[in-house]
Image (spheres, rainbow, N blue to C red):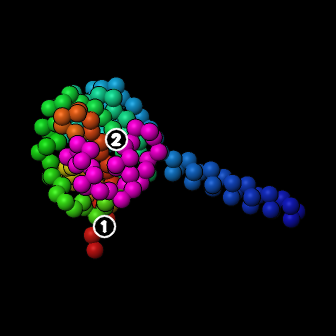
Amino acid sequence: MHDVGTFIRIAALCFACVVCQACSERVESYYPALSDAVHDGAVTRGWIPDLLPESSRSIHEIHSPDSPRTWCAFEFRPGDSRRLEKLAVVGDALPATVRQIEDPGPAWWPEVLKGKLDVAAIHHDGFALFTVEEPPFGAHIPTNLVLFAVGPSTGRGFFYRVPEPWPG
């Protein structure tokens, strides 16, 4: 009987580990064009903000289903970044929640946007930085902060979304 109880405890522990691993995995998506992301519902579900340039293409997005944390790379027609350029421009100091970005893993995420961010290095690589606060999706969900790194002349862009800390 002791062996059955031990077996049940081990099986329950293994099941819990599998469930936790499945819940923490990230989901990666690719869209050839912004219209494909819209059609798939990635914009209405909130994984891709409706701020991307209309000419956006080659969109790579990765997110954690249990968190608003999102990494995204996209290309666009050079000069078509007017929508993003209306956002808050980042000066020399980044907001605290985006000073450090965890490496999401895929090769499409640039080295300059990994770890502790260096604003001067990001600008040197040709990216302008913009931020926007997204309203919460529900009463118990904090506001999200989205950091955009956009190369207006190269037509390359990235964004990183992170939940803002709870006030107080």
* Label 2: which secondary element: strand
- Mark 2, mark 1: which one is toward the viewer? 2
At x 39%, y 56%, the residue is: 115
> In this figure, which residue is indicated by the disc labeled 2?
72
| x and y, in percent, of residue 12 in the image | 69, 57
Q: Nearer the viewer, residue 65 or 109?
A: 109
> In this figure, which residue is indicated by the disc labeled 1?
166
Q: Nearer the viewer, residue 150 or 65?
A: 150
| x and y, in percent, of residue 67 in the image | 40, 52
Looking at the rendering, in which quadrant would you find the N terminus? bottom right
The magenta span reads 101-128
* Label 1: which secondary element: loop
| Structural distance between the alpha carbons of marks 2 and 1 | 24 Å
Does residue 109 belong to the magenta stretch? yes
N-terminal of the pair, mark 2 or mark 1, is 2
Does residue 18 belong to the magenta stretch? no
Q: Amino acid at mark 2?
A: Cys
Q: Quadrant of residue 102?
A: bottom left
Vertical comparison of 22 with 1: above or below: above
- Classed neighbour count for the residue bearing mark 2: other residues with Cα under 10 Å, few (<14), some (14–19), many (≥20): many
At x 12%, y 37%, the residue is: 82
Q: Nearer the viewer, residue 104 or 135?
A: 104
Left/right placement of residue 36 relative to residue 3 reads: left
- Classed neighbour count for the residue bearing mark 1: other residues with Cα under 10 Å, few (<14), some (14–19), many (≥20): few
At x 23%, y 44%, the residue is: 127
